[in-house]
Amino acid sequence: MTKTKVIMLACFCAAFGAGVAVGVAGTRLAAEPGRRSWLGHELNLTPQQRDQMRQIWSGVMSASWQKQHEERQVLDRERDEAIRGLLTEEQKARYDEVMRKHAEKSAALEEARRKPFEEAVERTRQILTESQRKKYEELLQERGGRHPGSGPPGRPGNGKGPTPPRHGE
């Protein structure tokens, strides 16, 4: 095996390992005990509605999703730039094709991941009173379709659909 291939393999393995580590860490994060829900406060939810909101949103996504997503994008860019720097022009063309196919598969996964969020937003609407629903819609609109309390406007990635709330909201 040539030195270039060994280096490329090591870069791919390191990036894959980092992605797995971030994913495992994200799924193990738990809600902070006693933390008050920002959305519950904004919508003046009843205790029953707060419990229903926790059930709707628990397990959908961890509170650190956005940070993990941004960190992963940085790692991916660093890896891609390092690998491209090692390649000949012919290898770059083959690498670009591999990356194009990877991007297509990633887009399909993102679409499948986004669907549960859209469903959770709809289920959230269903448990709210009319005045709470109106406020919820205003909050969604202010945040560009993102779930209230989920961070700065604009969704990382493709910009479509709602994003998860902070844990417990």
Image: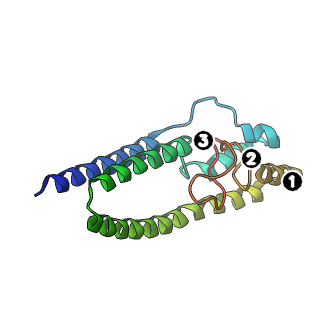
N-term mark: 1 or 3: 1
The quadrant holding residue 161 is bottom right
Rendered-image quadrant of the N terminus: bottom left
- Where disc 1 sits, the SS reads helix
* Crowding near the residue tagged with mark 1, few <14, some 14–19, many ≥20 C-alpha atoms within 10 Å: some
Quadrant of the drawing holding the C terminus: top right
- Residue 163: where, in percent of width, then height? 63, 53
Looking at the image, which residue is at 70% across and 37% down?
A: 37
Image position, residue 167 (x, y; %): 60, 41
Does 148 appear above or below 121?
A: above
Mark 2 vs mark 3: in front: 3
Say which residue appears at 59% left-offset and 60% top-offset. Answer: 158
- The 10 Å Cα crowd at callout 2, few under 14, some 14 to 19, many 20 or more, is some
Q: Which residue: 55% across, 66% down?
A: 111
Task: Quickly name the residue at label 1.
Answer: 134
Q: Mark 2 points at which residue?
A: 49
Question: Which residue is at a point 78% across and 37% down the rendered structure image?
Answer: 41
- Secondary structure of the residue carrying tag 2 is helix
Q: Mark 3 points at which residue?
A: 167
- Three-letter amino acid code of the residue under disc 2: Gln
